[in-house]
Amino acid sequence: MIKPRPVDRLEVHILVDNATDSLSSVPSHVETEFAYLNRKGMRILSGKCICCANHGLSCLITAHRDGVAHTVLFDTGPEADTFERNTRQLGLDLGLVESIVLSHGHWDHAGGMLRAIDLIRANGSNRDLPYYAHPDMFRTRGRQLPNGAMQPTEDIPSVAELTARGARVVSVREPQAFLDDMFYLSGEIPRVTPFETGLPLHFAKTETGWEPDPWIVDERWLGVNVAGKGVIVFTACSHAGVVNVLKDARARFAGVPLYCVLGGLHLSGPTEKIIPDTSRRCANSSLVTSRPDIAPAGAR
């Protein structure tokens, strides 16, 4: 149980997402991509000016308290070019990043990681750059195809590669509070619901060969307590199940409401069958105070 002192304000930039939409209406606390680019000086709307969607997720998160700001990079999407293009188009200064969090060991969240570290270091800074990881993230993963064959997925950058780029890898299973306790990174997420049973046909490679790995126990969520609102929960894929994620967040922030959850729910393909149970559990248990669905791409 923890009760970090709330931050005054939270800014979230979505750097990589698997959808692009600047036409739908959005809540008042969310700025569309076109509106953002216009505010930043875009004069002609064209494909050369806008961001690219890609399979995966990356968020740049800045918390403010008492005039002090801290910035965290949460995942980097599937590959370096999309990550760099989008941060450039959005006019963001990655030199402000003080810590990196990788949510879990999958290529679509770590593919741009080495380029990201290079961009963070581009101004010549050699300051400490913690990189929060879980030891199981660095295993080779794969998926079983319908014909029974195993298709490996790209490995995430290794500890040696990350260290050589200038990151200080903090590879632990325990939860972490960091940057003046503005950010809280969970430990391993307890699996307690009967219907959230992990990712089917997901495997990990061991010394004896491929073994089923549906639980993906290296997955963690990131939380920030915002004054007057509650906890913003960042969950990149919710392989543990979003209800399990929110139950753990509510237990860790006992007495503090959960304001919203932002990220991916992985309720597609073989896990579509648990959508009714997920919706019903969120609606009936008031896991999230203000809304039981994914928050739009931004929160303040």
Image (cartoon, rainbow, N blue to C red):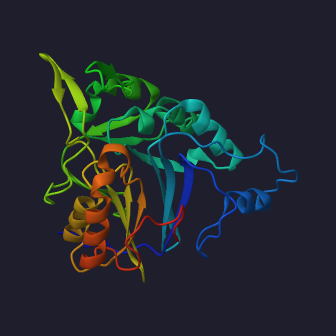
Q: Residue at x 36, y 52 (%)?
A: 267
Q: Residue at x 55, y 40 (%)?
A: 54
Q: Residue at x 15, y 60 (%)?
A: 193
Left or right, residue 238 beside residue 247: right
Residue 205, percent from left and from top: 21, 22
Residue 68, percent from left and from top: 50, 66
Left or right, residue 2 beside residue 41: left
Residue 233, percent from left and from top: 36, 63
Residue 24, percent from left and from top: 65, 65
Q: Residue at x 48, y 30 (%)?
A: 114
Q: Is residue 282 visible?
A: yes
Q: Is residue 74 above or below residue 257?
A: above
| The image quarter in which residue 40 lies | bottom right
Q: Is residue 123 visible?
A: no
| The image quarter in which residue 249 lies | bottom left
Which residue, as the protein is rendered here, is positioned at the far bottom? 228
Which residue, as the protein is rendered here, is positioned at the far right? 43
Which quadrant does the N terminus fall into? bottom left
Left or right, residue 198 beside residue 229: left
